């Protein structure tokens, strides 16, 4: 299998704060990689570097054989047509309706007629379970609906790669499961290569072919879910258990009461 | 002492860095005007936002400024028994300076701030990143329609300000000060020619360029959430107003030679 996305020795710092340290990741054709890690460990920064929204301090990103840091702006936009990005807070255009949001890239980058665009928008909305919501404005949508419209917008151009930035953060457990299933469906129906950033272990193991954990800017592990679950690294085990105590946090807040007291 | 040098040096570096960034972004925006795809729908929306929706403001300020200037002229020239000159000077002032500058300053407050706030909100809510991810150059999609709308609409609004400025002067000098309507009509245009109209419209176009570029740039470079969005319009209005007044001086000096 060939690598569609290759992250090679990528480092990034904002002032004195080092966010990513020499990260190496390869994602193969049709593979679903889930990246996990604590808040502020540079997962979103990594996605933004992959999209070319941020420049790494060192290292490079190769997508479909093209080094993102070496190509011109028009070439970068051509590469981006092959990638669908789903933002954490959806980032829908709030002055446009759901239809206009999903149709945006189709209108700008294809020669499709209005009727063809309407059919494609309907298809995309159906894939995320939002058929019939096309006239609503983003302000009229719930958090989960916004994310799903964001997915529909990202898949409109039939991209080869999908990037999901914390698609379930802030949603209730049921909606989290719904989003996880949609990502799984998109993966099977579209056969895309995807990178998903999430904190939700259930949906992570549901959609992942491989799981990576970023800790203090470094990629600690990148392996199949079964191997990841039994990885003896104490940081990974603490993350999987969801405990406050352990090496995962450098300065955890001191507990004010014991677990038993809190449960009383 | 070292601290002072450090601070001055830091401020200078920041100034040159901002000036450089503005120049690069503005050049990209101007070069993007001829790039495809042409977004007529978006352009029409901006024509309405910049032009049509600004008509009431321009009407009111145009009349008000012209009226107050006419009152001052009538009072001033009365001291020298030269009331007849008021209409001519009123015409000269309205066409050459008051209409373009007042329209420019009002538009900097109305549309420049709106552009900065809109783009600033889009920036902090990741909508501009979303545009980039949808393979759309934000400079092309956001800057170009606003820039074209300002370039076309500012001269038209200035023309409107000149027209209502005439009637503002008429109201005071004819209806209040008792000049004859015929004298006012002939004297208003006595000192001005087509060159003055050309100067006024050129100034308006340059002011439009300044307002759109500064407003969009400030919005595009917004950082820091709600506070950043709050600062962007203020900073846009202050910067573009200053540039309008500075360029007005140089344009006047250059074009009157």
Image: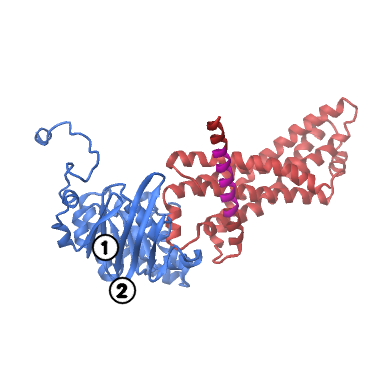
Chain colours: A blue, B red
Disc with the residue nearer the chain's start (2 vs 1): 2
Element class at badge 1: strand
> Which label is found at residue A33?
1
Q: Residues within 10 Å of mark 2 (few under 14, many from 20)?
A: few
- The N terminus of chain A sits in image quarter: bottom left
Q: To which residue does mark 2 refer?
A: A2
Whether A169 is drawn above or below B61: the answer is: below
Residue A81 visible from this viewpoint: no
User: Between residues A183 and B174, which one lies in front from this camera angle?
Assistant: A183
Extent of the magenta region: B9-24
Foreground disc of the pair 2, 1: 2
- Where is residue A16? Give x, y as percent: 39, 44
Residue B18 on the magenta segment:
yes
State the separation of the CA atoms marked 2 and 1: 15 Å
- Where is residue B111? Give x, y as percent: 58, 45
- Point out the residue furthest to the right here: B81
- Where is residue A226? Give x, y as percent: 15, 62
Whether B41 is drawn above or below A240: the answer is: below
Q: Are marks 2 and 1 in contact (CB under 8 Å)?
A: no
- Point out the residue furthest to the bottom here: A1
Residue B75 visible from this viewpoint: yes
User: Between residues A218 and B58, which one lies in front from this camera angle?
Assistant: A218
- Where is residue A57? Give x, y as percent: 42, 54
Whether B147 is drawn above or below B176: the answer is: below
Question: Residues at marks 2 and 1, common chain?
Answer: yes
């Amino acid at each position: 299998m060939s690598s569609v996305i290759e992250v090679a020795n990528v480092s990034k710092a904002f002032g004195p704060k080092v966010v990513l340290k020499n990260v190496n990741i390869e994602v193969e054709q049709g593979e679903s990689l889930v990246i996990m890690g604590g808040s502020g460990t540079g997962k979103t920064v990594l996605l933004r570097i992959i999209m070319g929204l941020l420049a790494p301090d060192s290292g490079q990103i190769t997508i479909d054989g093209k080094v993102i840091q070496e190509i011109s702006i028009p070439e970068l936009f051509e590469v981006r047509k092959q990638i669908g990005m789903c933002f954490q807070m959806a980032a829908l255009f709030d002055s446009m309706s759901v239809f206009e949001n999903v149709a945006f890239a189709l209108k700008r980058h294809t020669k499709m007629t209005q009727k063809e665009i309407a059919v494609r928008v309907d298809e995309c909305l159906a894939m995320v379970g939002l058929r019939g919501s096309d006239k609503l404005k983003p302000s009229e949508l719930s958090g989960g609906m916004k994310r799903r419209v964001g997915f529909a917008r990202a898949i409109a151009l039939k991209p080869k790669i999908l990037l999901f930035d914390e698609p379930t953060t802030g949603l209730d457990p049921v909606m989290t499961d719904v989003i996880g299933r949609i990502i799984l469906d998109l993966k099977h129906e579209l056969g895309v290569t995807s990178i998903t950033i999430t904190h939700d272990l259930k949906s992570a193991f549901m959609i992942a072919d491989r799981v990576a954990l970023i800790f203090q800017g470094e990629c600690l592990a990148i392996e199949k879910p079964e191997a990841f679950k039994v990885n003896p690294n104490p940081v990974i085990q603490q993350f999987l258990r969801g405990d406050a105590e352990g090496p995962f946090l450098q300065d955890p807040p001191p507990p004010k009461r014991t677990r038993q007291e809190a449960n009383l | 002492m070292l601290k002072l040098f450090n601070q001055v040096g830091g401020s200078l570096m920041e100034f040159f860095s901002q000036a450089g960034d503005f120049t690069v972004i503005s050049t990209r925006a101007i070069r993007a005007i001829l790039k495809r795809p042409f977004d007529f729908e978006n352009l029409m929306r901006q024509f309405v936002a910049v032009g049509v929706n600004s008509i009431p403001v321009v009407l009111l300020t145009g009349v008000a400024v012209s009226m107050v200037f006419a009152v001052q002229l009538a009072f001033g020239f009365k001291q020298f028994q030269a009331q007849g000159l008021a209409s001519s000077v009123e015409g000269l002032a309205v066409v050459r300076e008051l209409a373009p500058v007042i329209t420019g300053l009002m538009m900097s407050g109305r549309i420049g701030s709106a552009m900065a706030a809109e783009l600033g909100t889009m920036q902090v809510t990741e909508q501009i990143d979303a545009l980039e991810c949808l393979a759309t150059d934000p400079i092309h999609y956001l800057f170009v329609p606003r820039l074209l709308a300002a370039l076309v609409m500012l001269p038209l609004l200035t023309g409107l300000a000149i027209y209502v400025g005439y009637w503002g002067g008429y109201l005071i000098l004819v209806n209040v000060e008792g000049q004859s309507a015929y004298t006012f009509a002939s004297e208003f245009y006595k000192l001005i020619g087509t060159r003055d109209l050309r100067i006024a419209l050129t100034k308006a176009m340059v002011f439009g360029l300044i307002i759109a570029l500064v407003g969009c740039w400030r919005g595009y470079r917004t950082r820091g959430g709600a506070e950043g969005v709050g600062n962007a319009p203020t900073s846009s209005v202050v910067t573009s107003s200053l540039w309008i007044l500075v360029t007005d001086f140089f344009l006047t000096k250059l074009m009157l030679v």
